[in-house]
Image (spheres, helix red, strand yellow):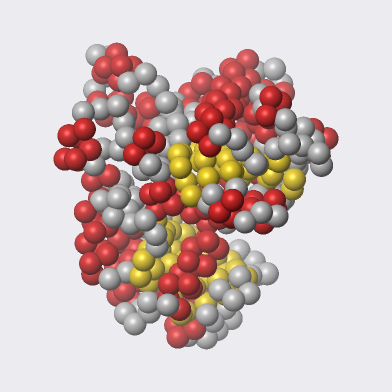
Amino acid sequence: MNVLVINCGSSSLKFQLINAKSEEVLAKGICERIGIDGRLTYQPEGGEKEKSEKAMPTHTEAIQFVIEALTNPETGVVNSLDEIGAVGHRMVHGGEKFASSVVITDEVKKAVEECNDLAPLHNPANLIGVAACENLMPNTPMVAVFDTAFHQTMPPKAYMYGLPYEYYEKYKVRRYGFHGTSHSFVSKRAAELLGKAYDETKTIVCHLGNGSSVTAVLNGKSVDTSMGLTPLEGLVMGTRCGDIDPAIMEFLAHKLDVDGVMKILNKDSGVYGLSGGLSSDFRDLTDASLAGDKKAQIAMEVFSYRVAKYIGAYVAVMNGVDDIVFTAGIGENDDIVREQVCSYLGYLGIEFNTELNKGLRGKETELSMPGSKVKVFVIPTNEELAIARETLELVRK
Ligand code: ADP
């Protein structure tokens, strides 16, 4: 069965068509500038990337163009819509309602809508993507895969904030965590590499991308993660500040309005802000650091230091660790960050293979020496494949 995986944002729609049996990506692409003008980038497996301008007033037109591209007699990869057996939708926030993926029904859509408050930018866009697909493929089963679901196993001591309990009861203010699909995918693979049963492992996954989070996975379950009610908490990220003293909000609010403060914390902070606005991209920061730029060096050091602090905390909450995994854009590609993070972890008995680490990009690798007490892995994440697998499993049921 072929599964169409959709990741829908407010003005963009990423897609991959995956053969769920062979796990081969048949085609992928993105619709951008939906509601503005519209641009489709489409690439069939082994073929050239094609870009075209197309009017996309809404997501329905975008999906229509995706289907046309996939079924195009020359560059398409399927003959008709009938060859798309199911659609898997990435959903950002499932609140406390979804602890696993589900087949989409009217009830599910209503429940997701009830979580809109918790992710006002993402959930409505995800639902628009579902509606657009339903319009064009009314008989194709669809599955929702939530970013938050994997973390629903966190115990109250990990998810409760030190706030009055009534805010949890009334407004569901608590920690949820994100990147769950990636943390789950990567930690499962890590157990295979360790040669242990998934439910007998202590793994710390560092998903370091534009948005970054660390998760403690104990016996196959997320027991703590660094993101909170929103993705702003935790690590210092590309442009997000991560953990800060909440009183900084008031301090800044005296100088700016609330929207201004939130823009600073979400878009102007992180390594971008720390580097004096140089870049949020670690390729630029690495180049600048190596050329002697002090702010870029500090930005990278702050980033790695915060990751190491979270690892230390999660070793404590799990009473040990078997392996530490680096994944996502920075984790898979940035050897300097990996080396900086691991430089704090010698006390765990990690023997880090500095030579092997150097220049290693995007390849599954064991980065610790053979005798290392705790293993270190680079495992490329693949959220689309994880969504396709979940979708297939649920549709088969
Ligand atoms: P997201 O999915 O959150 O947008 P990704 O996981 O794709 O993010 O990560 C994107 C980030 O990965 C980039 O902003 C950049 O900092 C980093 N990155 C990508 N390639 C490299 C590389 N070769 N070296 C260092 N960092 C890289």
Q: Is residue 69 visible?
A: no
Q: Position of residue 100 (x, y in %)?
A: 39, 59
- Comparing 342 with 89, the one in front is 342
Q: Is residue 65 above or below residue 328?
A: below
Count the labels in the image. Answer: 0
- Comparing 45 with 50, the one in front is 45
**Left or right of 204 on screen, residue 5:** left
Looking at the figure, which quarter contains the C terminus? Answer: bottom left
Q: Is residue 293 above or below residue 18?
A: above
- Comparing 27 with 182, the one in front is 182
**Left or right of 97 on screen, residue 177:** right
Residue drawn at point x = 52 percent, y = 86 percent: 79
Q: Position of residue 271 (x, y in %)?
A: 52, 27
- Choose top left, top right, bottom left or bottom right for residue 154: top left
**Left or right of 108 on screen, residue 4:** right
Residue drawn at point x = 69 percent, y = 44 percent: 377
Residue drawn at point x = 38 percent, y = 79 percent: 140
Residue drawn at point x = 30 percent, y = 46 percent: 119
Q: Is residue 79 above or below residue 97?
A: below
Q: Position of residue 383 (x, y in %)?
A: 52, 56
Q: Position of residue 58 (x, y in %)?
A: 31, 62
- Comparing 366 with 72, the one in front is 366
Q: Is residue 313 visible?
A: yes
